[in-house]
């Protein structure tokens, strides 16, 4: 039928001429309900919807065409068809731009369409993580938008949030510090962005100024906390005529998360993640005694005043996890920073008693810094990290792993080694780790335990390893150090294979282990 053909053209055509002809046919057939069925109006009217309604009152054909193009652009964006979305917005702008002097509402719609297109361009650039090039004068457009005087009625807070994140990612510190706050709805984003800018402006100094650290700490805690009010505070709030707006006197946690996951400045990401990890460790202090590592931990307070604020553990956990997933997706983070952030997250998992995830991320951190163990240097590796790995492996019952990891300590912890090798149960296959042992005392203890338990085959294999020339105690220091480097790499590869290879399961067959192990090129 003719009605079905019109519906099909409205849904699937992107040509303004065809859409205009279809709208005319439906108007002549007196079928206005088709537009409502295919493109239902929003329950909450946005500023652009209100301006489009005004245009439709004076020029129904033009208003309906722009509304359909705008709705199609939103749907294309929803389905990640960004090219089509931008094309539709550009078509609507091209149609209205020559007419903007005829009606103030048309000028308003053109402005909002430009905002939508700028939001799309900024979001696409952020997703590509390319901030140095200035394609289509994007940075100039972003600056122009942020400098405009926006009213609270028509400001696009999503665009403000993304534009500020884009400026921070480009390290446009001086520009951000020069911005003047113009609207109540945007001042929270701008104030936080300026705090970030002041921190980054100070990053080349030997130490971050304490007042800047404290300002950021207080601001983030204020967003995350539900302040506890006494009777006097409640009474004072009731006497204020702005009481209805008190709930909006700060950013919500959701808004903060949306802001942070659009920022790609390495130093800033490291500082914020360090802050959240310290806050998390303070909240969980009664559950764990793990000291969560972070580069900037020395700058943060060591306690929270619970008399003034209440912070939900789940809120901090969700925000920390979202930021870590953002870090994992970052393409151009310097290796040292990414490795440090991974180590912090591993400590958090250990605090939460999520031992498998903790070991996974510890090995990830080491593999990132050593380019999949091709380099022997691990600057982030220290006594604390190794002992945390030992704790996690102990809780998982991987006693052979524990004994081998103890070799990584500056002085092997023989108390732990001997105790774990005497355990009656082990969740890992001891045969996988013979080649990873370079400490003769460990190997001799292992042979003795295998003999006591009657594992003759395993004992003979361990003795054969012990007789290797590389393990000869009379070797020179140079040969010994080379042997240790090789076996350290073998140990890291074995741990990598255990925790990060697909189909990793307890008691998996050595054939499966060998197959997956050979699929990875470590050198």
Image (tube, rainbow, N blue to C red):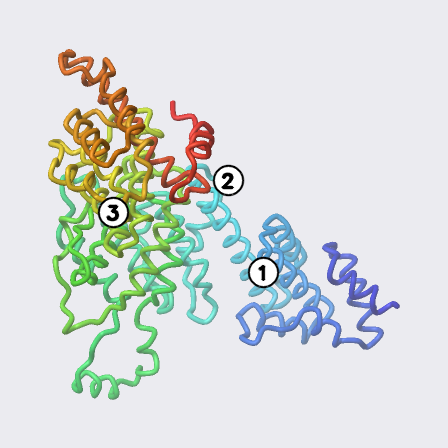
Question: Which residue is depicted at the point 38% across and 68% down?
Answer: 185
Crowding at dot 2, Cα within 10 Å, few <14 / some 14-19 / many 20+, comes out as few
Q: Position of residue 416 (x, y in %)?
A: 15, 40
Instruction: Choose mark 3 or mark 1, whichever is in front.
Output: 3
Q: Where does label 2 land, which residue?
A: 135
Which image quadrant for residue 407? top left
Tell me which label, 2 or 1, sits earlier in the chain.
Answer: 1
Q: Nearer the viewer, mark 2 or mark 1?
A: 2
Q: CA distance from mark 3 to mark 1?
A: 58 Å
Q: CA distance from mark 3 to mark 2?
A: 48 Å
Q: Which residue sits furthest right?
A: 1
Residue closest to the eye, 521 or 224: 521
The answer to whether residue 154 is above or below residue 460 is below
| Disc 2, SS | helix
Q: Is residue 458 left or right of residue 298?
A: right
* Relative height, residue 271 to residue 415 (above, below): below
Secondary-structure class at tag 1? helix
Residue 131 appears in which quarter of the rendering? top left
Relative depth, front residue between 207 and 101:
207
| Left or right: where 149 falls relative to 442 | right
Asked if residue 380 shows in the view, the reply is: no
Q: Which residue is mark 3?
A: 392
User: What is the x, y in percent for residue 159?
Assistant: 45, 58
Secondary structure beneath label 3: helix
């Amino acid at each position: 039928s003719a009605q079905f053909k019109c519906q099909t053209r409205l849904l699937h055509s992107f040509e303004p001429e065809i859409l205009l002809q279809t709208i005319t046919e439906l108007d002549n057939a007196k079928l206005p309900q088709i537009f409502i069925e295919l493109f239902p109006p929003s329950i909450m009217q946005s500023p652009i919807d209100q301006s489009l309604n005004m245009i439709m009152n004076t020029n129904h054909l033009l208003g309906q065409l722009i509304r359909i193009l705008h709705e199609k652009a939103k749907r294309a964006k929803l389905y990640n068809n960004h090219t089509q979305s931008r094309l539709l917005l550009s078509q609507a702008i091209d149609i209205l731009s020559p007419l903007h002097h005829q009606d103030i509402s048309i000028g308003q719609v053109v402005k909002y369409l430009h905002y939508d297109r700028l939001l799309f361009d900024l979001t696409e650039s952020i997703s590509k993580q390319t901030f140095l090039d200035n394609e289509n004068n994007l940075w100039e457009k972003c600056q122009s938008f942020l400098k405009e005087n926006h009213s609270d009625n028509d400001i696009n807070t999503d665009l403000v949030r993304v534009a500020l994140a884009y400026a921070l990612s480009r390290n446009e510190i001086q520009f951000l510090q020069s911005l003047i706050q113009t609207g109540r709805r945007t001042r929270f984003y701008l104030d936080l962005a300026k705090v970030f800018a002041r921190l980054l402006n100070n990053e080349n100094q030997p130490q971050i100024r304490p007042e800047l650290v404290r300002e950021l700490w207080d601001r983030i805690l204020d967003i995350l906390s539900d302040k506890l009010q006494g009777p006097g505070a409640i009474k004072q709030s009731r006497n204020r005529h702005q009481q209805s707006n008190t709930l909006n006197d700060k950013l919500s946690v959701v808004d903060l998360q949306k802001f942070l996951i659009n920022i790609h400045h390495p130093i800033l990401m490291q500082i914020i993640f360090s802050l959240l990890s310290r806050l998390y460790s303070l909240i969980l202090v009664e559950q764990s005694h793990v000291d969560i590592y972070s580069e900037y931990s020395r700058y943060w307070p060591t306690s929270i005043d619970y008399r003034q604020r209440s912070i939900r553990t789940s809120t901090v956990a969700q925000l920390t996890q979202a930021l870590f997933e953002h870090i994992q997706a970052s393409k151009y983070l310097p290796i040292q920073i990414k490795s440090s952030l991974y180590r912090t997250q591993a400590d958090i998992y250990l605090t939460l008693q999520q031992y498998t995830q903790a070991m996974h991320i510890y090995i990830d951190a080491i593999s990132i810094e050593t380019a999949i163990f091709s380099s022997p240097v691990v600057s982030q590796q220290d006594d604390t990290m190794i002992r945390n790995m030992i704790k996690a492996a102990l809780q998982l019952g991987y006693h052979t792993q524990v004994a081998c990891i103890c070799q990584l300590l500056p002085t092997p912890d023989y108390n732990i080694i001997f105790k774990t090798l005497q355990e009656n149960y082990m969740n890992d296959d001891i045969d996988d780790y013979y080649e990873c042992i370079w400490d003769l005392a460990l190997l001799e203890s292992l042979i003795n335990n295998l003999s006591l338990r009657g594992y003759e085959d395993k004992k003979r294999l361990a003795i054969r390893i012990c007789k290797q020339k590389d393990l000869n105690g009379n070797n020179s220091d140079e040969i010994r150090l080379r042997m240790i480097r090789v076996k350290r790499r073998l140990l890291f590869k074995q741990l990598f294979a255990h925790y990060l290879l697909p189909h990793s399961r307890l008691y998996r067959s050595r054939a499966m282990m060998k197959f997956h192990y050979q699929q990875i090129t470590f050198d």
